[in-house]
Amino acid sequence: MSAPRINGVIETCLHSDDLPRAVRFYRDQLGLRLLESGERLCVLSVADRQVLLLFRRGGTLEPVETPGGVIPPHDGSGALHVAFAVSEDEFAAWEKHLSAQGIPIESKVSWPSGGQSLYFRDPDNHLVELATPGVWEIY
């Protein structure tokens, strides 16, 4: 029996020691739109199609009761990774933008299939990637 179809990834989460600082980085420097803000969780829109959840580190160690049910506990530690899709036409503009914002580019990769990636760190030391089409067979 084959599994039913999964239609995509709707949310990705990172954990932060300082939520306001993390929100400022993703909102002000990367241009994501803030959807919700709280002490435990902040929610940002990624291209109005996906969601980046920023949790206060250690803030999800207990179950969270909602009107519709319970969210099981979860947490993350260490330097995690997230990649955002950017167009090939805007890749150079992103490189200039990051430099103008004082964000050091840790690495730039040209992939064999034609895609390019820029790697840099957020304030919590998570590895952030901006990637053009051609990085993966499906992207």
Image (cartoon, rainbow, N blue to C red):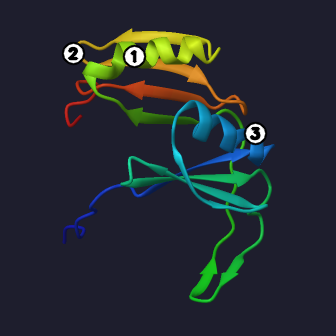
Contact check, label 3 and label 2, Cβ < 8 Å: no
Q: Secondary structure at mark 3?
A: helix
Instruction: Name the image quarter holding residue 115.
Output: top left
Considering only vertical position in the picture, is 4 above or below 12? Answer: below
Q: How far apart, in angstroms, are the residues tagged by discs 1 and 2? A: 18 Å
Q: Earlier in the sequence, mark 3 or mark 2?
A: 3
Identify the residue at horizontal 39%, vertical 16% (top origin).
Answer: 93
Q: Position of residue 110 (x, y in %)?
A: 32, 10
Label 2: few (<14), some (14–19) or many (≥20) C-alpha neighbours in 10 Å = few
Q: Secondary structure at mark 2?
A: loop
**Which kind of residue does numbered mark 3 sit on?**
Arg
Considering only vertical position in the picture, is 34 above or below 24? Answer: below
Q: Earlier in the sequence, mark 1 or mark 3?
A: 3
Q: Position of residue 20 (x, y in %)?
A: 76, 46
Left or right side of 14 for 32: left
Nearest the eye: 75 or 105: 105
Q: Position of residue 27 (x, y in %)?
A: 59, 41
Label 3: few (<14), some (14–19) or many (≥20) C-alpha neighbours in 10 Å = some
Q: Position of residue 119 (x, y in %)?
A: 51, 19
Instruction: Name the image quarter holding residue 118.
Output: top left
Q: How far apart, in angstroms, are the residues tagged by discs 1 and 3? A: 24 Å
Identify the residue at horizontal 28%, vertical 62% (top origin).
Answer: 6
Q: Quadrant of the N terminus?
A: bottom left
**Which kind of residue does numbered mark 1 sit on?**
Ala
Q: Mark 3 = which residue?
A: 21
Q: How far apart, in angstroms, are the residues tagged by discs 3 and 2? A: 34 Å
Q: Mark 1 = which residue?
A: 93
Q: Mark 2 = which residue?
A: 114
Q: Earlier in the sequence, mark 1 or mark 2?
A: 1
- Closer to the camera: disc 1 or disc 3? 1
